[in-house]
Image (cartoon, rainbow, N blue to C red):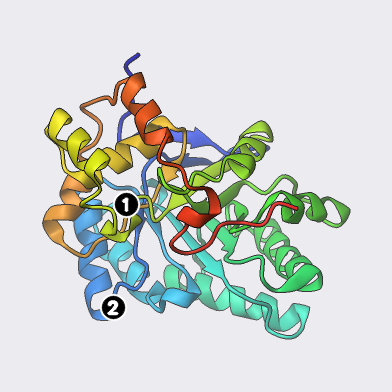
Amino acid sequence: MLNNFAITDLLPLPNSSVKIPRLGFGVYRSPPTQCKQSSLKALQVGYRHIDTAQFYGNEKEVGEAIRDSGLPRSEIFVTTKILSPAGSPEATYKKIIDSVDKIGGKDGYVDLFLIHSSSSGPSGRKELWQALERLLEEGRAKSIGVSNFGVKHIEEMKAYAKVWPPHVNQIELHPWCQQRVIDAYSKKHGIVVEAYSPIVRNYKANDLTLVELAKKYNRSTQQILIRYALQKGWVPLPKTDDPEHIASNADVFNFNIADEDISVLDGLDQGSAGAIVEAVVNE
């Protein structure tokens, strides 16, 4: 079956009028001096979705790239994240607003704001979510979600969340870490699943199975992994600062991995042992 995806595709977020581009550009650990150029290159080759975070230290540069791109702001989807609460609801809210200001200016907005980690405990997660709900009500975020949340973390939110389910759950996803429990749970509830580290930071570039498939399709290993993520229904967020790779990582919409080869890649799953960053805790 040919999956006729396009880089311009948008996916609906649950209980929302907002739609998210099917492919995103990650800027994890992209140095501020480099990040703006990489983001501009990504927008030039067709990405319309940039994923940053407070932790990455480059929100301001992403904002500059968006303004300098010449594209209408409404055509670009930008995500950022907050890692931990700031000590009080008001301080946490201010920390969130600071990010929006860095990216969009005093009157600007972000398209998606995520809780970056589940690690701040039940009260911390609640404080973060309520600050994000306030941001959403004020229109300075168009959608809100979570990252690295397992089933128990999302279920826990029902006790206090006005916005449930979260619009997005961003987790580590690639053939070696498929996180099938949280992936199935998220999809069941309409939560869009974003895949970070979809190319496994190139750690698997010499994996024999992957190399063989890349040869078969006459593609790079990165292109195989990004296409795999797309066909799994995930929103992949590949990261690179290499201009050629920025372009080639977006060139994944003119071929299709056959079902039997998807099954081969599915067979590489190592569960949580396959994670290079974090596998979520579901119970």
On the rendered structure, is 5 left or right of 186? left
Above or below 31: residue 103: above
Q: Residue at x 11, y 54 (%)?
A: 244
> Which residue shows up at 47% across the image and 57% down it?
275
Count residues near mark 2 (Cα–Cα under 10 Å), then give few for <14, some for 14-19, many for 20+. Answer: some
The residue at the point 47 percent across, 59 percent down is 79
Q: Looking at numbered disc 2 in the image, what kind of residue is underneath it?
A: Pro
Residue at the limit of the structure toward the right, as seen here: 159
Left or right: residue 38 compared with residue 73: left
Q: Nearer the viewer, residue 74 or 113?
A: 113
Q: Which residue is mark 2?
A: 31
What residue appears at the point 74 percent right and 80 percent down from the top-left corner? 90
Q: Is residue 212 above or below residue 102?
A: above
Residue 197: x %, y % from top left: 39, 56
- Tell me: 156 left or right of 238: right
Report x, y in % for residue 185: 67, 38
- Residue type at mark 1: give it: Ile
At mark 1, the secondary structure is: loop
Residue 111 showing in the rendered view:
no
- What residue did someone put label 1 on? 199
Question: Residue 102 got which mark?
Answer: none
Residue 41 falls in image quadrant: bottom left
Q: In terms of depth relative to the viewer, which is nearer, 127 or 215?
A: 215
